[in-house]
Image (tube, rainbow, N blue to C red):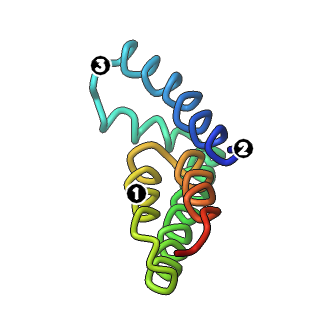
Amino acid sequence: MTYLALAVWGAVHPMYYFVSWFLANGLDLGGMVDAWHVNAATSGLVWDLTIAAIALTLWVLAEVSVRRNWRALIAIPATFAIGVSCGLPLYLFLRSAPVK
């Protein structure tokens, strides 16, 4: 249940900042991407999270192909639509269920 709580927190907390940004700047996705690369620190963080998201996706795919836990695939769209902070704990929650 801790993983599930972290997944919810990882969805809600970052979304607060995204919604705040959209309210201030409109639905300008290009502007948001520009803001992600405003300096070297933010660019580094974007690349760090991008690489982590790709690694998580490959891990999910590899484990799903062995464990046949098809429900766990929901972690992939959660990772790219919400973020690694939601996708990783969500996958760990789904993975922690007994193998059938």
SS under mark 3: loop
State the residue lying farthest toward the front: 100
Q: Is residue 77 left or right of residue 98?
A: left
The N terminus, quarter of image: top right
SS under mark 2: helix
Q: Nearer the viewer, residue 23 or 40?
A: 23
Eye-nearest disc, 3 or 1: 1
Q: Amino acid at mark 3?
A: Gly
Q: Position of residue 69 (x, y in %)?
A: 46, 72
- Look at mark 2 in the image and give the residue it sits on: 2
State the residue lying farthest toward the bottom: 66
What is the distance, in whole Å, between disc 2 and disc 3 at their CAs? Answer: 35 Å
Counting labels gives: 3
Nearer-N-terminus badge (1/2): 2
What is the distance, in whole Å, between disc 3 and disc 1 at their CAs? Answer: 29 Å
Q: Position of residue 77 (x, y in %)?
A: 37, 55
- Look at mark 1 in the image and give the residue it sits on: 74
Q: Amino acid at mark 1?
A: Ile
Residue at the spot x=55%, y=71% of the render? 55
Q: Amino acid at mark 2?
A: Thr
- Look at mark 3 in the image and give the residue it sits on: 26
Check the image and report above or below for 30 versus 85. above
Eye-nearest disc, 2 or 3: 2
Q: Is residue 21 left or right of residue 10?
A: left
Nearer-N-terminus badge (3/1): 3
SS under mark 1: helix
